[in-house]
Amino acid sequence: MTSASLDNNGMPEIETAALERLPELLRSRGWYARVIASEEQAALLRVVNPLAPPLNDDLALRQDQAGLWWFCWSFGDRIAHIDNLDIAAARIIQVLGCPEA
């Protein structure tokens, strides 16, 4: 890990900023998305399909063995690298159902 400063969850601040930018992007596309943070566990991103609320997930940021950070589904599969916000948003919308449908 580099000497980047860490947030309260032990993630470098740049990764935390990515976790905050993705919900803004999703909300701009009509989705419900917000960061859920607690002192007991790492921050999560709750995403909900506005037309079908049962279609939802709590996404996480996870670091791989090479030290790269990824947006991941609650079951652990990768969605996209944190630098690829548009790809992450598109995959989330595709999997959880398009709100225009």
Image (tube, rainbow, N blue to C red):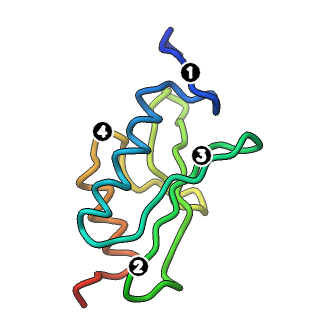
How busy is the neighbourhood of tag 1: few (under 14 within 10 Å), some, or many (20 plus)?
few
Mark 4 lies on a secondary structure that is loop
Please name which of the two marks, 2 or 4, marks the residue nearer to the observer: 2
Q: Which residue is mark 2?
A: 49
Point 22% across, 85% down: residue: 100
Residue at mark 4: 83
Q: Residue furthest top?
A: 3
**Crowding at mark 2 (Cα within 10 Å: few <14, some 14-19, many 20+):** many
Question: Where is 79 relative to 8, above or below?
Answer: below
User: Tag 2: residue type?
Assistant: Asn
Query: Tag 2's secondary structure?
Result: loop
**Mark 4 Cα-neighbour bin, 10 Å: few <14, some 14–19, many ≥20:** few
Figure check: 2 above or below 33: above
Residue 26 lies in quadrant: bottom left
Residue 9 locus on image (x, y percent): 64, 33
Q: Picture coordinates of residue 50 (x, y %)?
A: 39, 81
Identify the residue under disc 1. 6
Marks 4 and 1: which is nearer the front? 1
Q: Is residue 31 left or right of residue 67?
A: left
Upstream in sequence: badge 3 or badge 4:
3
Which kind of residue does numbered mark 4 sit on? Asp
Q: Nearer the viewer, mark 3 or mark 4?
A: 3
Q: Amino acid at mark 1?
A: Leu
